[in-house]
Amino acid sequence: MEEVILDAEERMTKALDHLREEMRGMRTGRAHPGLVESIRIDYYGTATPLKQLANISVPEPDQLVIKPFDVSAMSDIEKGILSSDLGITPQNDGKLIRLRIPPLSEERRKQMVSRAKEVAEESRISMRNIRRDANKHIDTSKKDGDLSEDDQSRFKDQVQEVLKTVEKQVDADLKRKTEELMEI
């Protein structure tokens, strides 16, 4: 049963990591490499994350500079950025791609906050499904006679505690991202 609980905890942590990765890609008023790192670029027929194809730097608070390792990938990177949902037009000078990050309007900030809430809720749902799976496994073990009722209850409580802990982290991450999005 300890394995079931550890597996549930590991899967919930992965869901939390996924949430954090999603939130990193959400645009705020400031430039940061996380905005574009995970954009998939069609590079010789393979969808490759931008961070594997180029060096991404932040020379100014409102600008990103992308320097491809392979200059021949420049147009592919530009197409990938244009087709992403970032909403920024890249400026290509032949050696570098510059992205100017415009300030967000109040309406756009509110849209981003609601998107952050949606992503957080999806993460919570995923974690609750993991709890359900762990509880099913515990119930099955009880039916098979491997567990007493006290053990069943204790293990379910442990799974619930893991869920509460991870959900608190989701709430903290959502609060932090909301504040970041709403600051001017």
Image (spheres, rainbow, N blue to C red):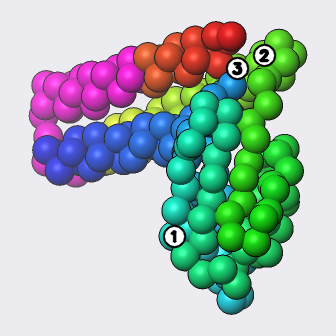
Q: Nearer the viewer, mark 2 or mark 1?
A: 1
Q: Secondary structure at mark 3?
A: helix
Q: CA distance from mark 2 to mark 3?
A: 5 Å
Residue type at tag 2: Lys
Which residue is more in the foreground, 60 or 87? 60
Seen at 29% across and 46% down, the residue is 10
Magenta-span inclusion, residue 150? yes
Q: Quadrant of the N terminus?
A: top left
90 is higher (above) or lower (below) than 142: below
Q: Which region shows up in magenta? A: 143-169
Looking at the rendered image, the quarter that the C terminus falls into is top right
Contact between labelled residues 3 and 2, with CB atoms less than 8 Å apart: yes
The residue that mark 3 highlights is 113
Q: Secondary structure at mark 1?
A: helix
Q: Position of residue 150 (x, y in %)?
A: 13, 25
Mark 1 — residue? Answer: 52
Q: Are marks 1 and 3 in contact (CB under 8 Å)?
A: no
Judge the density around disc 2: few (<14), some (14-19), many (≥20) Cα neighbours within 10 Å: some
Relative depth, front residue between 22 and 3: 22
Q: Which residue is mark 2?
A: 110
- Label 1 is placed on what type of residue? Gln
